[in-house]
Amino acid sequence: MSRRYFGTDGIRGQANKAPMTPDLAMRVGIAVGNLFRRGDHRHRVVIGKDTRLSGYMIENALVAGFTAAGLDVFLLGPIPTPAVAMLTRSLRADIGVMISASHNPYQDNGIKLFGPDGFKLSDELEHRIEALMDEDIHLQLARPDAIGRAKRVDGVHDRYIEFAKRTLPRDITLAGMRVVIDCANGAGYKVAPAALWELGADVIAIGEEPNGTNINLNCGSTHPVALARKVHEVRADIGVALDGDADRVLIVDETGAVIDGDQLMALIAESWAADGLLRGNGIVATVMSNLGLERFLEGNGLTLERTKVGDRYVVEHMRKHDFNVGGEQSGHIVLSDFATTGDGLVAALQVMACVQRMGRPVSEVCRRFEPVPQILKNVRHSGGNPLNDALVKTAIADAESTLGSSARLVIRPSGTEPLIRVMAEGDDRDQIESVVDQLINVISGVRNAA
């Protein structure tokens, strides 16, 4: 079934333009409120947001929708996505909502939904929500005496900080570790530096002055140059880069080099396997994770199971097959012993625990394998799906034949932007770069012809 509103990570788009309008947010609230209203008890929803200017607008529209559907609303304010998932369960809410476009610029915004168990909603539930959104909303409104109430909730930052701190092994302290953390001027700007400081670290925070329009702007996990510069300047032991809603993390070592999610998953999996904590005898990642990670795990007697792109697909596979480590190369690290979604701070704490135990520099601890050359390029399009074109299909078949079984080719439409992503990896960099460029040219030609 095709989707009108939902992508790979909720609903996302440019704020105040279709689909990301106040009207849509209100209809989401009404539809979701009706879908999750079960029984006669007072139903409740928790709503968090990142630091985007448009968050105020979307928050108020969601409140209008949920209260109109008869739900009580608990407003959390700016707080990380994983904190919303955690507080949905902790506050026994029927639904959790995060207003964020994650790593996108401030002009974009989005709506992420969590069920009462703290997990992101399934494709089936999203289809049902879309169907309700397109029906007559006047038939879904609560009686005048059943309209919901809304209130701000105090102390949620402290609750999340304590939760995050408890994920660090008891025998580990961060005392003596100098940490630079880049909060991306986003949702983690208060809680992340506070948690690290309370655990004993010497903390230097950057990207912690949000103004509504500077989220992810030349900072955070999508732009780690500023963090690398600061690590070098203050001679820090480690740099931690969050994204706008703090559900992903990248690490910068003491030399200023960036360490991606594949390396972090390899480190955590190896460490947990040695301690007898790793379930599933491996990890779950997406089709975008590097072939070098797969080879590293195989060399350690572990497996890599791949899903399509999107951390919720990783989580679904983890739950179905009892894995407790999974994630994406981009830095979504899901550690299901602690959380139901990616958590940048919690993943960073596990990495720092490994560093403290080994007593070696981050550059040595966090580089577990040599990545296979991987080329990823994007083609912007104006609509439709160029991948259905006959010329593109033929070019893809030719590319797969050229690469053979020792390399990988992944071509997919972005779930959050009008882009076609073309990725190839293999031991011969010149070959994979040539293959990617040829495919980009064919797809571009189809796009321009259209």
Image (cartoon, rainbow, N blue to C red):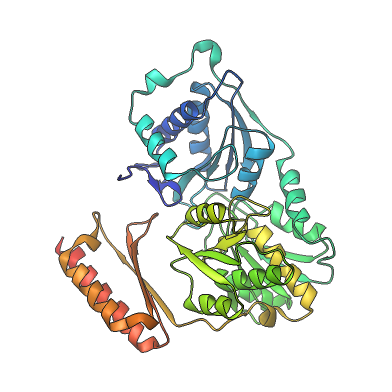
Viewer-side residue, 117 vs 151: 117
Q: Examine the rendered structure and indicate whether residue 167 appears above or below residue 435.
A: above
Name the residue rendered at 85%, 64% in the picture.
Answer: 171
Placement of the C terminus among the 4 image quadrants: bottom left
Q: Which residue occupies 71% across, 41% down?
A: 156
The reply to whether residue 268 is visible in this rendering is yes
Residue 97, position as x, y percentages in the image: 54, 39
Q: Nearer the viewer, residue 125 or 162?
A: 125
What is the quadrant of residue 176 in the picture? bottom right
Between 133 and 218, the residue placed more toward the observer is 133
Query: In the rendering, at what x and y percent does residue 326 appear?
Result: 57, 62
Residue lying furthest top: 145
Above or below: residue 152 compared with residue 314: above
* Residue ID at (59%, 49%): 81
Query: Residue 405: horizontal and vertical position, in percent?
Result: 36, 80
Viewer can see residue 254: no
Query: x, y percentage for residue 355?
Result: 74, 74
